[in-house]
Amino acid sequence: MAKKEIKTQSELADLLGISKNQLSNILSDEFDPIKSNVRKIADFFDISPLSIIKDKKEKD
């Protein structure tokens, strides 16, 4: 987030067009993210959606 000059999760959620609660859930692994939200995050950070899913599964 620092590379994009984003200081808070709320700011990132606003930029992604999702709620802070949705972003928090994705980052904390409480719930499986909605595919469209994974795509938004991946596109924003210019990374593969699979890298987000892979990191999440490796923690389980």
Image: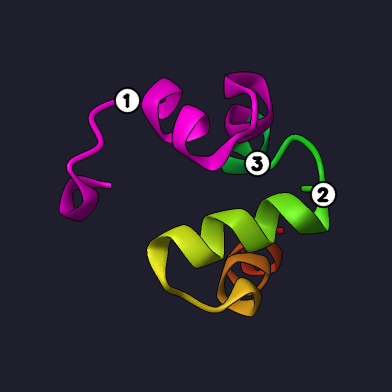
Return the residue nearer the eye: 51 or 42: 42
Mark 2 and mark 1 in contact (Cβ < 8 Å)? no
State the CA–CA distance, disc 3 to disc 1: 15 Å
Q: Would you place residue 49 above or below residue 15 in this image? A: below
The tag earlier along the polypeptide, 1 or 2, is 1
Secondary structure under the numbered disc 3 in the rendered image: helix
Q: Residues within 10 Å of mark 3 (few under 14, many from 20)?
A: some
- Dot 2 crowding, Cα within 10 Å, few <14, some 14–19, many 20+: few
Amino acid on which disc 3 is placed = Ile
Q: Quadrant of residue 8?
A: top left
What residue is pinned by disc 1? Answer: 8
Q: Secondary structure at mark 2?
A: loop
Which one is earlier in the sequence, the residue at label 3 or at label 1? 1
- Name the residue nearer the viewer: 29 or 23: 23
The three-letter amino acid code for the residue at tag 2 is Ile
Q: Is residue 34 left or right of residue 58?
A: right
Q: Is residue 11 magenta?
A: yes
As helix, strand or loop, the secondary structure at mark 1 comes to loop
x, y percent for residue 54: 64, 74
Q: Nearer the viewer, mark 3 or mark 1?
A: 1
Which one is closest to the eye, mark 3 or mark 2?
2
- Give the residue type that dot 1 points to: Thr
Residue 16: give x, y in percent of width and height: 53, 41
Question: Height in image: 49 above or below 59?
Answer: below
Q: Return the residue at label 3.
A: 26
Mark drawn on residue 16 = none
Range of magenta residues: 1-24
Residue that carries the numbered disc 2 in the rendered image? 34
